[in-house]
Amino acid sequence: MDERVILQVLAEQQEYLEHYRKNTWITRQEESLLEWESNMAQVVIGVRRSGKSTLCHKVLLQHNIRYAYADFDDDRFAALKTSDLNTVLNCLYQLYGTDMQYIFLDEIQNVEGWHLFVNRLLRQGMYVFLTGSNAKLLSSELATHLTGRYNEIRLYPFSYLEYCQSEDISLHSITTQANAARKAALTTYLQDGGMPELRNITRLQNRRIYVESLVETIVSKDIVGRYKIHNKEGLRRMSHHLINNSCQVLNYEMLSTIAALNATKTVQKYVSYLSQAFLIHKLQQFSFKSRQRITNEKAYVIDTGFIANRDNALISENIGWRLENAVLIELLRRHHSMAEDVYYYKPSSRQKEVDFVVCKQGVVLELIQVAYTVADAKTFKRETEALFQASKKLSCNKLTLITTDESRNVEIDGKTIQIYSAVDWLLRVQER
């Protein structure tokens, strides 16, 4: 690319930084994971529009750090090659000064060979911040070329707590009005999700346009363009089907029919691509046998706001599934950074399923069941028995049941089950 064009684009992006200086930011819990004085590259990955760029800008600006910035998701950089990256660096020196020590590279994985460029910056002693919206392209290249020299942070859409903060909803008041506001906020959150920009769009049609365009960008730009997919329409149908059927076991035969593909391996690749682009999360079955873990995987959507805010989304209003989906994303948010894994538990067709198992290095830390309500005696018995049976099988005594009912503890044959209202559980500080 012509140096003058690169310089113009970067200069316009520099002017846009003033937008961040004037913003009112929501504190994200992942901010504490960024190490702004580390010699390791700080890498923030997650679904598009989840706030990755804002997170990095916020941390850098609030610590009064002067930094250079380049956004590689700019359409004018579509033709950028590896050989152009040194020109980009030269232009950044012109704009920000030759003494710059910090550099923020947004959606860097769009440029082939980016990892070599980043490695050079690190060798030169620069502090590097990166963002990206594709787990495989970032993580695999980092692991190969920057071994031990990067700090990876996964950012999800707003949590329920962050959503309440963004809407100025009291988190601590015990008044009847405050309790009602938090419950109403939960209903809205399960319906509309936590994508930061979506909460500011009020018209239903505009919300649909936003979500559909976001899904289309993920499919077209993060998958089709990157992996040279020929059956774009089949991939698009598959992605919408998985969103419509969140929390369900993946049925590859059905997906092959939906996508008009004959090869199951190709369908599995497509699902993997959707997972790597953070549109869905694949949840494995808990088992000490590797083969059982990778069969009967479930698919959850990365944000419940994707479920209803689309044209022709004729889906069930099952609020229980949306609550289950929201709980999983919250579990990933809380446990991924601590190297703890989340599974579901279904040892056989005869035994009751437990929604989530949290474990670390093979040790089960907690069993979690999610139900919209357990007011009905039959439902209460089903959900608590599932936890009790799994507790004996997996030698775990931390048993949690999350519902929209009131929080309380129950004793069953000497075992305590903590029943949390969804509001209380989503707002509580993770115990350690």
Image: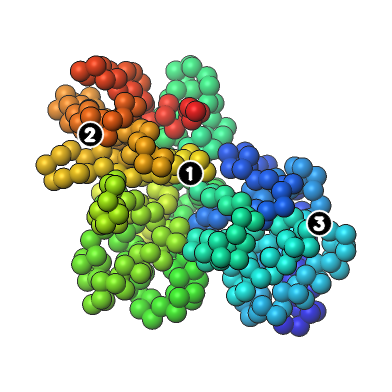
The spot of residue 187 in percent (x, y) is 39, 37
Mark nearer the N terminus (3 vs 1): 3
* Quadrant containing the N terminus in the rendered view: bottom right
Q: Secondary structure at mark 1?
A: loop
Which of these two is toward me, 225 or 90? 90
How many neighbours does mark 2 have within 10 angstroms: few (below 14), some (14-19), or many (20 or more)? few
Q: Is residue 297 above or below residue 400?
A: below
Q: Is residue 386 above or below residue 73?
A: above
Q: Amino acid at mark 3?
A: Gln
Which residue is under mark 2? 393
Marks 3, 2: nearer the viewer: 2
Q: Is residue 242 visible?
A: yes
Q: Is residue 406 visible?
A: no
Which residue is found at the position 62% from the left and 74% from the top?
Answer: 113
How many neighbours does mark 1 have within 10 angstroms: few (below 14), some (14-19), or many (20 or more)? few
Which residue is under mark 3? 101
Name which quarter of the figure residue 235 lies in.
bottom left
Q: Amino acid at mark 2?
A: Lys
Which residue is found at the position 65% from the left and 79% from the top?
Answer: 81
Q: Is residue 364 left or right of residue 218?
A: left
| Separation of residues labelled 3 and 2 (CA atoms) | 54 Å
